[in-house]
Amino acid sequence: MRTALYPGTFDPITLGHLDIIRRSATLVDKLVIGVAINRDKGPLFSLEERVGMIEAECVGLAEQTGLEIVVHPFENLLIDCANDVGAQIILRGLRAVADFEYEYQMVGMNRVLDSSVETVFLMAEARYQAIASKLVKEIARLGGDVSKFVTPLVNEALSQRLSS
Ligand code: ADP
């Protein structure tokens, strides 16, 4: 059984994340979505809210693809989290050159910490590639339409959070 850990902040989950999750079904049997608590990043949504949105969006995806999906909050070292959940693979999405430098360093350092866990990068479909949670929040905050970047459920959560 092949298991991957897909870590991130998911503040909030976007169509870019969901595309990566869907694509992972061709590579693994089980995907553990690791939701980083990331207090330092000052997330807009609480951990429980982020987990709830991911779970709601992944039910259909799991049915469609046959992929087993588990949502797992974590605060420890990524490589320890991978071992805790029995993942042989860390899955990351790659957007642009800007992501590369950081990811390159992470892979290098994680490999020193544990060389048995392999990092795999996937690219989202072209129309989802530019989507970033940070920009989605900025656009929504300024009253822009983010319906092409997130699901209706997340869109609603964003308008509620930003109007209160
Ligand atoms: P992090 O704080 O780890 O960057 P994010 O929630 O922003 O957390 O992203 C989680 C993962 O999903 C990262 O590997 C990121 O590169 C990837 N990702 C986010 N948006 C996209 C996208 N539009 N296309 C491809 N990968 C993406």
Image (cartoon, rainbow, N blue to C red):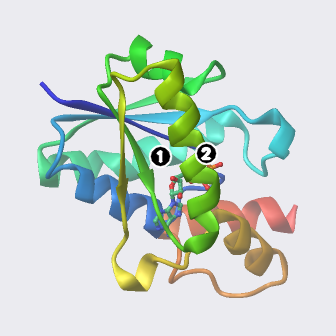
Label 2 beta carbon less than 8 Å to ligand 1:
no
- In-image side of 107 versus 9 (left or right): left
Check disc 1 and report the residue beneath it: 54
- Neighbor class of circle 2 (other Cα within 10 Å; few <14, some 14-19, many 20+) is few
**Mark 1 element type:** helix
Task: Please tell me which residue is depicted at 33% across the width and 22% down the height of the picture.
Answer: 116
- Neighbor class of circle 1 (other Cα within 10 Å; few <14, some 14-19, many 20+) is many
Q: Position of residue 3 (x, y in %)?
A: 25, 29
Amino acid under disc 2? Gln
Of the four image quadrants, the one with ligand 1 is bottom right
- In-image side of 117 versus 132 (left or right): left
Q: Which mark is residue 105?
A: 2
Image quarter of residue 17:
bottom left
Task: Please tell me which residue is depicted at 47% across the width and 63% down the height of the picture.
Answer: 94
Q: Position of residue 43 (x, y in %)?
A: 78, 47
Q: Nearer the viewer, residue 131 or 54?
A: 131
